[in-house]
Image: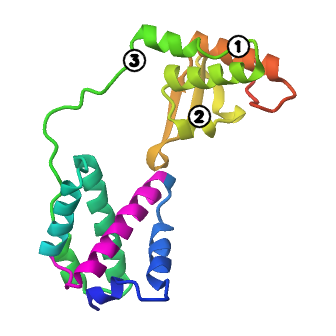
Amino acid sequence: MTSEALIPRAGGNEIETFIERVLDGIQSANTRRGYRRAIAAFVAFMAERREPLSKALLNEFKAGLRAEGRGNAAINQALSAVRFFLREAATDGRLDPVEVERACKVAGVISRGRREGNWLTREQAEKILTAPDTTTALGLRDRAILALLIGAGLRRAECAALTVEHLQQREGRWCIVDIAGKRNKLGISQQRNQKRHSLSMNRVTTKGIALFSFPDF
């Protein structure tokens, strides 16, 4: 049970197989992608250093991420991925659980202050919404997508996964319900009039083309 168990061997893919097995337990595709990237970087770091796992070694990996110009959030996600991977390796008997817990005591990066964000003005939002050519089926589709992204605040993946069943009336208002967002949390978003019109127009014009299958309003 040494860190050698995490170092890839020439001509073999046993470590890669183990990593994929570990990641299978993560439901979010985005999280899996980020964790896979961070774990691969850590395994490569371990292969280069050839040192026993320790808190000092993980701190050095963290410092390397900072030297690469990674932001606080990216560093913290990478550390979370590595901690997750190391604990799974300990459970699998590849590493000493005591040494793993010592290494996992490496603290994340503390972010101070408040994120202000970068928001669209009303004029900018209207300019984006009116950009598609609504005389074509594709333009109507694009306008419906933009209306959902801007007006309902859907993420790209949420919009792409939208089905007829998600559109329901609640207390006299049209809503998008049971949206599986980050970490598969379910949410609800109310629709304003502009989105209802966009979706309705898209449905009437593209009927039979199967670009979208939103209901008529």
Mark-to-mark CA distance, 2 and 3: 19 Å
Relative placement, left or right, of 61 versus 173 is left
Q: Over which residues does the magenta segment extend?
A: 30-54
Judge by depth and name the residue closer to the eye, 110 or 181.
Answer: 110
Residue occupied by mark 1: 134
User: Does the segment drawn in magenta span residue 53?
Assistant: yes
Q: Amino acid at mark 2?
A: Cys
- 10 relative to 84, above or below: below
* Residue 157 at x, y percent in the picture: 55, 41
Q: Magenta stretch containing residue 137, yes or no?
A: no
Q: According to the image, label 3 marks what residue?
A: 120
| Alpha carbon distance from label 1 to label 2 | 19 Å
Q: Secondary structure at mark 2?
A: helix
Question: Relative to residue 95, is residue 19 drawn left or right?
Answer: right
Res 204 visible:
yes
Classified by dominant secondary structure, the portion drawn in magenta counts as: helix
Q: Residues within 10 Å of mark 3 (few under 14, many from 20)?
A: few
Which residue type does callout 3 highlight? Leu
Could you tell which of marks 1 and 2 lies nearer the N-terminus? Answer: 1
Q: Which residue is mark 2?
A: 159
- The alpha-carbon separation of the residues under discs 3 and 1 comes to 22 Å
